[in-house]
Amino acid sequence: MNESESAPQPPLDDAVRPHVFDGIQEYDKRLPNWWLFTLYCSIAFSIAYWIYVEKFEAVPDGAIAVQEEMAETRLAASGKSGESTDDSLWTMSRDKTLIAAGKLTFDTTCASCHRPDLMGMIGPNLRDQKWVHGGTPMTAMKTIEEGVLAKGMPPWAAVLGKKKITEVTAYIFSYHEKGEPAEIAPWVPTMGAPPEAAPVAPQPSPVAPAPAQPAS
C-alpha cells in the first residue's frame, strides 16, 4: 500500500486551496453558520447603536452623566448629614445640574407668586439685593421651609422636601454673588409687571450748523 492510498482523503464538500506554503495546503472550509450569524448580528447591532447614540443623541454624553451623578452624590451627602450651610448652598448655586433641577421646581411651584423671571409680583423680587427676611441662603431656605403665613406664603417643607428646597435655594442664589450687599426692605405686592427702571432722559439733538453765507 503506497502513501497516497494511506493518506486521509478530504471530504468531498471541502475543496483544497490552490496555494501551498511550506509544503502545507489548507482546506477552503466554510465557516459554521452559527459563527457567521453571530458576526452579522454584531455588525447590524453596531450600526444600529451608532445611529441611536450619535444621530438621535438618545444616550447622554459621558461627561454630562458623570457631572449629574456627582451632583446627585453631593446633594445626597448633604441631605444625609442633615446640615446645610451658607457656604454649601453658595457652592450648590454654581452647579448647573442643581440649578436646572431647582428651576424646574420653581417654575411649577413658586413662579405664580414670584414670576418665572423671579422679578416679584405677589411675592417679593428674588433677583435684586433687597430682602424681606434676610439675604443669606440659609435664611431664604428657612423661609421656604416654614413659610410666612402672615404674608400668604405656606410652608413648603412637607410638600417639597429637603432635596427640592435645597435645589430651589441654589437656583435663586444663582442670580446673586457671595458677599454682595443686602438690604432689608418690605415688599409691596403687585399684580402686574414689576416697576421698571426710570427712563433715560432724552438727549438734546445736536444743533445743525447754520448754512454758510455766500461771499458778497
Image (tube, rainbow, N blue to C red):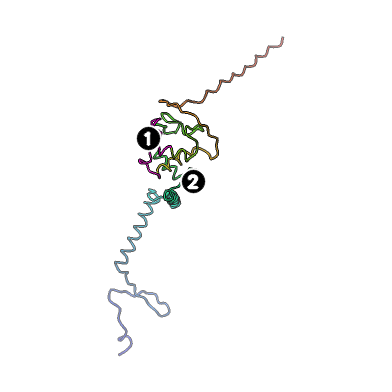
Q: Residue furthest right?
A: 216
**Secondary-structure class at tag 2:** helix
Q: Are marks 2 and 1 in contact (CB under 8 Å)?
A: no
Q: Is 86 situated above or below 188?
A: below
Q: Is residue 53 above or below residue 196?
A: below
Q: Nearer the viewer, mark 2 or mark 1?
A: 1
Tag 1 residue:
154
Q: Position of residue 184 (x, y in %)?
A: 51, 31
Q: How many angstroms separate mark 2 from mark 1 (CA)?
A: 25 Å
For the C terminus, the quadrant is top right
Residue furthest out toward the front: 150
Query: In the structure shown, which secondary structural element does the residue marked by tag 1 occupy?
Result: loop
| Marker disc for residue 88 | 2
Q: Which mark is residue 116?
A: none
Return the x and y of residue 107 as percentages of the image width and height. Answer: 39, 36
The magenta segment: 143-162
Prevailing secondary structure class for the magenta stretch in the rendered image: helix
Q: Amino acid at mark 1?
A: Pro
Q: Is residue 156 magenta?
A: yes
